[in-house]
Every structure is written in C-alpha cells, then in structure tokens.
Amino acid sequence: KEDHAYETVVIDSLDWLEPLCWDFVCRIGSKKSIEEFGYGKGYVVALDEWRRLIAKLDKIKDKGINVILIAHATIKTFHDPSTEDYDRYVLKLHDKAAGLIKEWCDIVLFANFETFAKKDQRKAVSSGDRIAKTQHGASWDAKNRFKLPEQIPLDWTELETRINLFNPEQASVLFAEIQTLIHKLPVDKRANARKAAIMAGHDVAELTRIVNKINEVTSK
C-alpha cells in the first residue's frame, strides 16, 4: 500500500511455501495433517489460500511491480493414452496448486543447463550455460503470452528485452504503416510483404524489420 522504490517481488520458493500453507490450513481447520480433511479435500481447502495469495500478487502487479515465483521441479511419469508412458519435469507442488499457479502466470519458464548429446559417446555434455524453455515440451511445462523464442538465455535483461518487443499497441501502428507502404512496392512483391506482416503478429522487431525493408526497396 505504501510508495517505495522496489521494482520486483520474488517468492523463493513455492514448494517451500506450500507446507506453510498446509500448516495454516490445518491450524484453522483443527486438523493434524492435510490428509485428515478427507480424500483430496485438504488440498481443495488449501487452494483457497493460494487464490488469496494470487489476489494480493495481482494488486502488486497493478502497481507496475514485477512478480517472480520460483519453484523446484520433480520428475513424474506421464500416462499418455496416445503413446507410451514417459517421464517429464513438473512443478514440485500438489497438482491443484500447480495448475492454478501456471494458469495465472503470464510466463512459465523451465530453467536448465544447456546440454548436448555426443554422437560418438553415449552421454550428454553440458555447456555450463543456463537456458530457459519458454514453450511447452514433452519433457517440461512452459508457456508464454509474449511470443518468445522457444529457448532463451536464463537472463533477466534478455527476458525483459524480449517482453518489451511484444507491444500490441506499437505493433498495430507498425502494421498500419506497412499497409500504407505496401502500395509503393511493385505489384508482384505486395502479397509477400502483406503475408510477412500478418505472420509477424505482435513481434515489434519483425514488423520494424519489414518496414525498413520496404523503405529500402522503394527508395532505390
């Protein structure tokens, strides 16, 4: 509620916070453990506390403050009816809490070390670089609402730069500019330019590149 100079709040980590949530729920519910509520019921009660936390984090976001939630990963076997069972990394949280958190977040990153497989040797080698997966994969959970590349360096500046490139308002201005500039192009090049602009979506960097390219072609 107070004015301050802080720009980011970090919870490290969610899987250490979860037992505190369960202890609180058990205390107010006069239970000795989360399982004592009955089959699965304790986790549903705990979900209400997670929602209260999210409501407070929303107020923090509304003040323009970044919210970062860190969680460890664990490996679980995924039973896929369309293929054979396989192992994948998931959040080290109860499924209900994990689902709620992932749905609320704008970006879910899966962080790991960059690893390469050596063809001549049956082993993997790490480069030592930390990377982040931004899109869902068979082996991990990830998502983003900013059209990030599939993989980026695990670096705050890199992430912030990529997010800032996703600016729907600026993208709309650039898209409109492209539609105007297209008429200066030779007729046989207009369709490709229009298609490229549509494919770029809200990618400000790509739309800017298209504008510059059209200006370059039409100025000759």
Image (cartoon, rainbow, N blue to C red):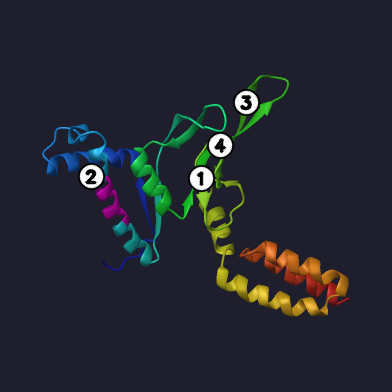
Residue of label 4 = 138
Q: Would you say residue 53 sits in the magenta stretch?
A: yes
| Tally of numbered tags | 4
Give how far apart the Cα atoms at labels 1 and 2 are: 26 Å
Residue of label 3 = 124
Q: Would residue 117 be found to the left or right of residue 144 on screen?
A: right
Residue 171 figure quarter: bottom right
Magenta stretch bounds = 47-54
Give how far apart the Cα atoms at labels 4 and 2 are: 31 Å
Residue 3, visible in the rendered structure: yes
Q: Position of residue 38 (x, y in %)?
A: 20, 34
* N-term-proximal mark, 3 vs 4: 3
Name above or below for residue 3 compared with residue 13.
Answer: below
* N-term-proximal mark, 1 vs 2: 2
Q: Position of residue 75 (x, y in %)?
A: 45, 30
Residue at position x 87%, y 70% in the image: 188
Q: Residues within 10 Å of mark 3 (few under 14, many from 20)?
A: few
Q: Secondary structure at mark 1?
A: loop
Give how far apart the Cα atoms at labels 1 and 4 are: 10 Å
Residue of label 1 = 142
Nearer to us of marks 3 and 1 is 1
Q: Position of residue 58 (x, y in %)?
A: 34, 61
Q: Position of residue 28 (x, y in %)?
A: 13, 44
Q: Would residue 171 be found to the left or right of residue 87 on screen?
A: right
Q: Secondary structure at mark 2?
A: helix
* N-term-proximal mark, 4 vs 2: 2
Q: Residues within 10 Å of mark 1 (few under 14, many from 20)?
A: some
Residue of label 2 = 45
Name above or below for residue 2 compared with residue 32.
Answer: below
Give how far apart the Cα atoms at labels 3 and 4 are: 18 Å
Nearer to us of marks 1 and 2 is 2
